[in-house]
Image (cartoon, grey):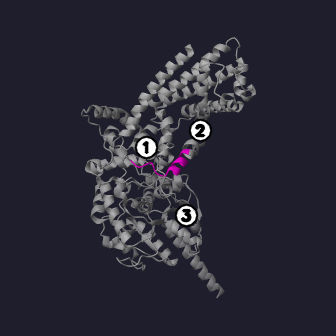
Amino acid sequence: MIAAAVLAIVLIVTITLFGRRALLLYRLVRMGKPIKRFDDLPARARAEAVVVVGQSKLLQRLLPGLMHAAIFWGFIVLLPTIFVAMIGIIDQHATLPWLGQQGWYALLVDVFAVLVLAGVITAFVIRKIQRPRRFVGSHVREADLILLLIAGIVVSLLLWHASQIALGLNEYPAAWAPVSSLLAGALHQQWTPYLERGAVWAHVLIILGFLVYLPYSKHLHIFIAAVNVFFGRTHSRGRLEPVDFEAPDEDVRFGAATVADLTWKQMVDTMSCTECGRCQDACPAYNTGKELSPKLLIMALRDQVLAQGPKALAAAKSGAAFKLEPLVPAAVTDNVVWDCVTCGACVRECPVGIEHIDHIIDLRRNLVMVESRFPDEAATMLRDVDRASNPWGKPQSDRAHWADGLGVRVLAAGEPAPDVLFWVGCAPSFDERAKQAAVSTAKLLEAAGVDFAILGPRESCTGDPARRMGDEYTFQKMAKQNVGTLNDAKVGKIVTTCPHCFNTIGKEYADFGGRYEVVHHTEFLAGLVRDGRLKPLAGDRTITYHDSCYLARHNDVREAPRELAAAAGRTVEMPRNRERTFCCGAGGARMWMEEKRGRPINEERVREAAGTGAETLAVGCPFCTVMLDDGVRTTGAKLQVIDLATLLAEAVERRRSQDADASTAHG
């Protein structure tokens, strides 16, 4: 009875300490602003099965993934042994009904205890010998303590089972537990009874200590990560949550100024971070020497939540006045906020569903719309979008000049809608280098007999640069204007060369009443090639294709562009490709901001392209065209930056010339 009483006291203390901390964390989450994340339950269940149970994101890196999976799956299998051990403390002859008597479960326990121990050893090797750069800034000593506690849990479990076998206390044949049986044979019989008592107590106490420590440590993610994954985005990864300007003034959320402005999902984000650094490893800003690290950003926000949140809760309870510190610069600097290119690499790599871009954009929204604090060169872009309806500040009357002489139909108000509306976008309309993609696309559509038209001066900037800059008001103004135009024109299918227009019209305009079938020009043209309406002939040029972030990562368009590249010549891949592409540096409105810190992102990408030995750098984005062409000029790389539509147009003309020559020869 003494053992039972002591165990009861320990459990009461553990539950009290754990419960107090858990309640505080719950209250902090409840303090967060509302956000809709209770829809699409089947997709959320799939995410739990694939990302949490299946460890899919962690297994993208094989060795660290297997290490973590071994520990995670091991703890799921070993979970019942906690209750078996507590029963064993009270009565060493008792166990869990049925399960504790099964030999197959004893085998599972032995196997997974060894796997967990192997995982811990592997983790120490990675951290202490390999020392990946992604761990820079993480709480490594805290992680070491956690690993030692995990090792203590499984070692004490194996020693307890071994001593039980040596004493004949197990209710299954010893052969079912080969590892424990092997250890049992090495035990000194005189000390075995004491070892059995010591091991079972050590096992339970380490587990309970671990339970108390977790909510105070970064390993809080053990409890929170599954919750965060469940409430992650299930679709439209490129979409940002709109600001509801129609709500009562006190409910309008102009981004995030303090911890009280974070949504409850963002609160959970900060508590979910494992400090693994996978986001940091993939971040183009961090990898080119900028101040931004997505990992350190979330860690800093977490520290601010845990420091300021309890004070805010206490002040709210007592009715006392309490002024929260601003997130910028108390938690993160202005540079961190403006370094982001919103490429989404961090979000894709994160194994626990943290949505870094939402945090960045909300910080920007507060700085832009409330404090009017942003880089000087961005002010010109925002003014031009607001005044001239395009970031170049050019007259809308010039918008269709790229099509002069092509015979492209400009859709006037009241005219019947075409089968396809070609949404040209601002860059092809006003930038000489991006213009060629629009010209080539128009020629190909005409050659394939597609009924299409453009809006000309009635087309305006989608508002993407303003929104990613944080100027939600200007974005919504442009969005509502464009949705009105498109709806009045009764447009159904839209084709665009710009992944940013593609993402905004296709994924974000639905929030403002604009629901359309939006297709990227590479997808549409690849379909025309498959249908035989365009017949290309591959040339002898070597092509490497650069995946646009807003195409390959945010919207999963990866294979159609490669079909076009293969139709135009010999292809070779860059090391970072498809969903793991490396940004050109233009996203997040960085197209209009100078890179004043670190190395230029576009030059980094151009060097990678040049390293393939290709002579042509193919792109499917006008922003990428401009940025990578600049990178070629500044690095001196021997590359031509060409849009896939232009490469396809050349291949189609090559086939036409060959057929004409063959016809002449036969004639």
Q: Residue 655's x, y, as percent? A: 58, 76
SS for dot 1: helix
Answer with mark 2 or mark 3, whichever residue precedes in sequence: 2
SS for dot 3: helix
| C-alpha separation, residue under disc 1 versus residue under disc 2 | 24 Å
Q: Which amino acid lies under the numbered mark 1 shown in the image of this protein?
A: Pro
In this view of the protein, can residue 578 be seen by the observer? Answer: yes
Question: Which quarter of the picture shows residue 206?
Answer: top right
Look at the image and say whether residue 641 sits in the magenta stretch. Answer: no
What residue is disc 3 on?
560
How packed is label 3: few (under 14 Cα within 10 Å), some, or many (20 or more)? some
What residue is disc 2 on?
69
Mark 1–mark 2 CB contact (< 8 Å): no
Magenta segment range?
Answer: 35-48
Q: Residue 230's x, y, as percent? A: 49, 45
What residue is disc 1 on?
294
User: Between residues 15 and 506, which one lies in front from this camera angle?
Assistant: 15
Asked if 574 appears above or below 231 in the picture, the reply is below
Which image quarter holds the C terminus?
bottom right
| C-alpha separation, residue under disc 2 versus residue under disc 3 | 34 Å
- Residue 229: which numbered mark, if any? none
Answer with mark 1 or mark 2, whichever residue precedes in sequence: 2
Q: Residue 44's x, y, as percent? A: 51, 48
